[in-house]
Amino acid sequence: MELASVTRRTVAFAFDVGLLCALGYAALIVAAPYGSRAFAESSRGLLLLLALGNGYFVIAEALWGTTLGKRLCGIRVVTVSGAPIGWWRALVRQAARLIDGQFLHLPGRLLIGLTPRRQRLGDFAAGTIVVRQRPTQ
């Protein structure tokens, strides 16, 4: 298995975050005529957007091992033995992003760049690695 580079992982994550921001913004525009401004400014609206954003990563990685950004960059998440990660590992990876994601994701990127298996804290906690996908024959 060829490990994914920090550059591929960063580009994939940036794509996913951009996609989620665009979808969230579009949802607010569509809902605005129906009085969503108060909802969007409330803590419930923020919690809903956070849950949907985090859910995207957990669901996509648990079911397919990849998000849209990862798929476009040709990478996927697997266990250190190469198996699919499943729900628990996907949840652990995302929960650890609260720490990895501090200071523009600098801790996570540093760990990816400095560790032999290119793992961020979430990967260590979940027992996962991010690898390049093999082209389909």
Image (cartoon, rainbow, N blue to C red):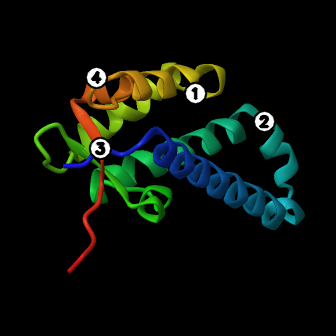
Q: Which residue is mark 4?
A: 125
Image position of 86 (left or right of 106): left
Observer-nearest residue: 61 or 77?
77
How far apart are the two marked residues, 4 and 1, measured between alpha carbons? 17 Å
* Crowding at mark 2 (Cα within 10 Å: few <14, some 14-19, many 20+): few
> What residue lies at 78% left-to-right and 35% top-to-bottom?
42
Q: Which residue is mark 1?
A: 105
Q: Name the amino acid type tagged 4.
A: Ala
Q: Which residue is mark 3?
A: 3
* Crowding at mark 1 (Cα within 10 Å: few <14, some 14-19, many 20+): some
Q: Nearer the viewer, mark 3 or mark 2?
A: 3
The disc, 4 or 1, on the residue closer to the chain's N-terminal end is: 1
Q: Name the amino acid type tagged 2.
A: Ser
Q: Name the amino acid type tagged 1.
A: His
Instruction: Please determine whether, in this image, residue 134 is positioned above or below residue 52.
Output: below
Q: Which residue is mark 2?
A: 42
The disc, 2 or 4, on the residue closer to the chain's N-terminal end is: 2
Q: In the figure, residue 51 lies in which quadrant? A: top right
